[in-house]
Amino acid sequence: MSSDPAPAPPAISVLFRTAADEPPPPDGLDRAALEDLNLDQLVGVLARRRPSYDLTPTVTRRLTDPDAVAYRQEVFRDLDRDDVRDAVDRFCAAMLRLRRFRSLAVSRQAPAERRSWHLHAGRVYVEAVTRLVGDLAALEVRSRGLTRLHGHLEQLLASSPFRTLAADTERVHAALGTVRYRLHLVPQGVEVLHDDGDETDLTAALATTFAAFLPDELPVPNPEPRRAAAMTHLEAQILDRVAELEPETFAALEGYVDDHPDPVDPAVLAFDRDVQFYLAYLEHVATLRRAGLPFCEPIVTRAAGSPVLRETFDLLLADKLLTEGARPVGNSLELADPERLVVVTGANQGGKTTFARTLGQVYHLASIGCPVPGREVRLTLPDRVLTHFAREERLADRHGRLQDDLLRMRVILQTASADSLVILNELFRSTTIVDAQVLGRRILDRLAGVGALTVYVTFIDELAARGPDTVSLVATVDPSDPALRTFRLERRPADGRAHAAALAERHGLTYEAIRARHRT
């Protein structure tokens, strides 16, 4: 993932209220959390939807001010309307053509071709901004971001430089539209000549001859290029020759480029770039919504409080399951003071790690202003999301897994605060159960002392009975068949031993069953 700084937000932004809202690039702990929570995969999914834009900074950098989050939530609310999203999609499609035309205006060799692409870019820009202003006015957008953008664009349209640009664009384009020339194929190549009107126009004769094969109404020619493709070498030579035949008209084109070398307003370019974050995310979750999976606008605060998350699910896993014809299982968590530690136990592969990852995803997505998976979510914005998920050992590591666990935990314990979310998954599996229990209890004690909201996934049931600040969640199995996981987590005392006993009984591995077989 790229950690390069994003462009500074302009005075008008749909991402930030002010430049002060922009968070710093992720550090090592942030990047580790993004990977542990599979949010690096979300960055890849959204990037594939918008390959021309770098969405990484927006997706990876959490906001810490609830009103900065609300600012984005408002924009999401507007863009969740089909009419608003259609208008913005039209604008973005025009800006895509604009960027292509501008690229050609810089890269092509022939002067007349470069200038013609510059003019086409100017036309697209004027038409796109004018139409967007009309659309936003008619649609009555409500978000602060789009309302401020609309006000800025109205002022832009009324400004003298924009009115001059629009008039010059139309004047030069109309003048070029009057240019007529003839091509003669000769042994030496192609001659470009003035169209003096002496040549017979065969259009009517051809239309009559082929009338049976033509539609009732011929399409009106589109003055804009049908494809944003560079001219061939021959086409560019013809255009340069036409420019020699029409010096005044092409001098006006040259003057247009000189007078308007870079006409596009920075806020327009920034909006085209920044709105892709909203559009890409809404496109991604649209498939999940159509499948009936719930999404909601989370209620976020900065004041300390107890979280409520109902029917949440792993965003990336849900997408994968739907492609396989399955559906994710939603899980809930609701805490009350003084509960700050959540110990998750239960059957292996029963959804414990997925739940922990889901919780982290929901907090992160809420922190960047996105609708989140779930029916209801209320949470406090964390200052940090700190994670520790098991990693495969590598030959290059200078120490073993236990030492690696301890070193990583030391950094987390030194960093965590009362405003942090800490997610720990399957710590100390490389040591004895007794040692893992002792180390786990000390870590929970330290985090409880700090006051950090903590989720601890473990195979040690005893940690779930720590005290009144600790909640026990258990990954359940089918009561009639302990081998079948339900992937649901229930708030109840840890019962791993009961689950193991049920499995042993099912497979004839209880103490009594083994003794009976031995006696026979």
Image: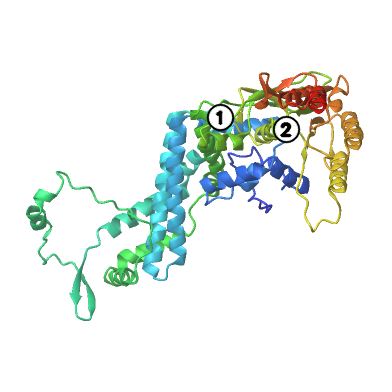
Percent x, y of residue 183: 20, 70
How many neighbours does mark 2 have within 10 angstroms: few (below 14), some (14-19), or many (20 or more)?
few
Asked whether residue 186 is in view, the answer is yes
Query: Residue at label 2?
Result: 348
Residue 477 lies in quadrant: top right
In this view, the residue in front, 470 or 215, is: 470
Query: Residue at label 1?
Result: 327
Q: Considering only vertical position in the picture, is 144 above or below 175? A: above
Question: What's the amino acid at mark 1?
Answer: Arg
In this view, the residue in front, 326 or 79, is: 326
Numbered-mark total: 2
Q: Give whichever of discs 2 and 1 has the lower sequence position.
A: 1
User: Which secondary structure, mark 1?
Assistant: loop
User: Which secondary structure, mark 2?
Assistant: loop
Left or right of residue 124: residue 361 = right
Residue at 11% over, 67% down: 198
Percent x, y of residue 241: 29, 72
